Amino acid sequence: MRYMVFVKMAPDAGDAPPALFEAMDTEMGQAFADGSMIAAGGLGGGEQIVELRLTDGAITTTDGPYAEAKELVGGFSIVEARSQEEAVEGARRVLELHQQYWPGWNGAVEIRPIWGPDN
Amino acid sequence: MSDQPTQEAITAVWRHESVRLVGALTRMTRDLDLAEDLAQDALVAALEQWPDSGRPGGGVPANPGAWLMAVAKRRAIDQFRRNDALRRRTAELARGLEEAEMPEFDAAVDHIEDDVLRLAFLSCHPALPPESRPALTLRLVGGLTTQEIARAYLVKDATMGQRISRAKRLLAESGASLEMPTGAERQARLGDVLAVVYLIFNEGYAASSGPEWTRPELCLEAMRLARILSWLVVDDPEVHGLQALLEIQGSRLPARRDADGRAVLLEAQDRRQWDQLLIRRGLTALAEAQRLGRAGRPVGTYVLQASIAACHARARRPEDTDWPEIARLYDVLAAAAPGPVVEVNRAVAHGRAHGADAGLDVLAAVDDDPALSGSHLLLAVRGDLMERAGRRDEAAAAFREAAALTRNDDERALLSRRADENTLDRRA
């Protein structure tokens, strides 16, 4: 089963330290190799965000940043796991790496199954 | 972490860690059975201690791999000390283990490629009977528990446990070397490993027994193993070829059964259900295999089969299939690895590419091959070619005979249906 993992953090969290990227590369190396990590990446925020919205028949466009947002999705991964527990375990490691390499960072990971033929 | 980890969560940790744990312990103790026991003991300790997160040392620790390794090593040292007869010989080993401190686990990670490959070579060792190799491979390289393997193969836990213990005992008795094979032996042993991974996949792709036509979990594990091998052995076209073959065939799993769970053959499949991610991975692996082939590394049957599978994967609609190319590839495959099953598939390809009669000509050559007597495969293909040639009585007879021979319930239903479609009084 495939899962999408969102990494959510404060909008003003800033850029991740290079050490975190390096640690993620090492940790994720085998996961990419055996196919359990399908894709992963960081997402631009602030004024790079564009939102299109359909409300009452009208499409409006809003540019970031959203000062009022408490948390934004700042990164994501798509993983293949044999069970929900396995996906959760992988996500827990991502948080641990943040804990270790990005002191002061607060945030959350959210794990969502991707609908497919097997669920 | 304040939440209490469940047994499932700890098993998930185990999956992440068991392969490198057993691999490193095997390298350190030079004893696969002992390494597995030590790793299992560490898992039991984790199951006891982690769920009780209220107590010091409870909860999933920050670096679970290092925790498991430390426990396993402590038990290794205890065990070596207890064993008087071996004290002298093992004193040194125990000291070596003792001196190695916690960060040693991180150092062990440096060896992970070798450790995992060593486990793969051991699991598929020539001293083992072919039927125990898949189970041991899934256990040692795939990191599956005995229960999971038993479930995948539809046998009792105890039966699978015995099969695995017997395999490990055989390895110990045969004095199987823990050293990495080199040169021509390495090539041959690598071939054994690939064959086992392919066997695991095929058992999942078209189950030889049981009520289900496919067992996708075995296919997924085989794909995972094939990817790990591509990662470990980067310069062998056949390794990438096997990965490509499994990814592309695996991409069709969602389309191989209809809403009622019945088998759907390739040309009738809804191609929108093919898993495009797996196809992409498969084509990438195939391109790598072909690149290595052009650079002079020997290409074999996995690359050829993957090339054939890729022809199907690239066709958006069945009528877009490049059958002349597939027929050509089967000609090459039949020359490289002659055999009745290849001939049957070659007959299918020539039938599509150059007309049903061309296919029947190829088939005629293996008609009375003893290896195919009692197999439904040849009869199913003859039925199909006869149907295409408009010889429907002969088609019905062949399908009927094929249905009587297959052991898979789903496949029997499919063949009977096609026999009915060609039977005179039921024709549309």
Image (cartoon, coloured by chain):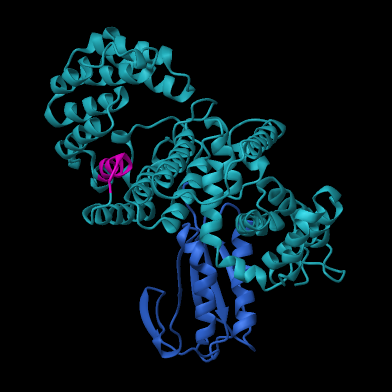
Chain colours: A blue, B cyan
Classified by dominant secondary structure, the portion drawn in magenta counts as: helix
Q: Within the image, what quadrant is residue B266 found in? A: top left
Residue A73 seen in the figure: no
Q: Residue at x 67, y 36 (%)?
A: B169
Query: The magenta stretch spans which residues?
Result: B298-310
Q: Is residue B299 magenta?
A: yes
Is residue A38 shown above or below B392? below
Tally of numbered discs: 0
Q: Quadrant of the C terminus of chain B?
A: top left
Question: Could you tell me residue B286's position as x and y percent?
Answer: 30, 52
Is residue B72 shown above or below B55? above
Q: Residue at x 62, y 40 (%)?
A: B175
Q: Within the image, what quadrant is residue A98 found in? A: bottom right
Specify the farthest residue to the left.
B354
Instruction: Indicate left or right for B200 with B97 as reference.
Output: left
Q: Is residue B193 magenta?
A: no
Question: Could you tell me residue B397's position as x and y percent?
Answer: 30, 9
Q: Residue at x 66, y 45 (%)?
A: B145
Foreground residue among B133 and B55: B133
Is residue B215 shown above or below B186? above
Foreground residue among B211 and B295: B295
Q: Residue at x 28, y 21 (%)?
A: B381
Question: Could you tell me residue B98's position as x and y percent?
Answer: 76, 67
Foreground residue among B20 and B297: B297
Question: Could you tell me residue A11's position as x and y percent?
Answer: 53, 87
Instruction: Indicate left or right for B99 with B418 as reference.
Output: right
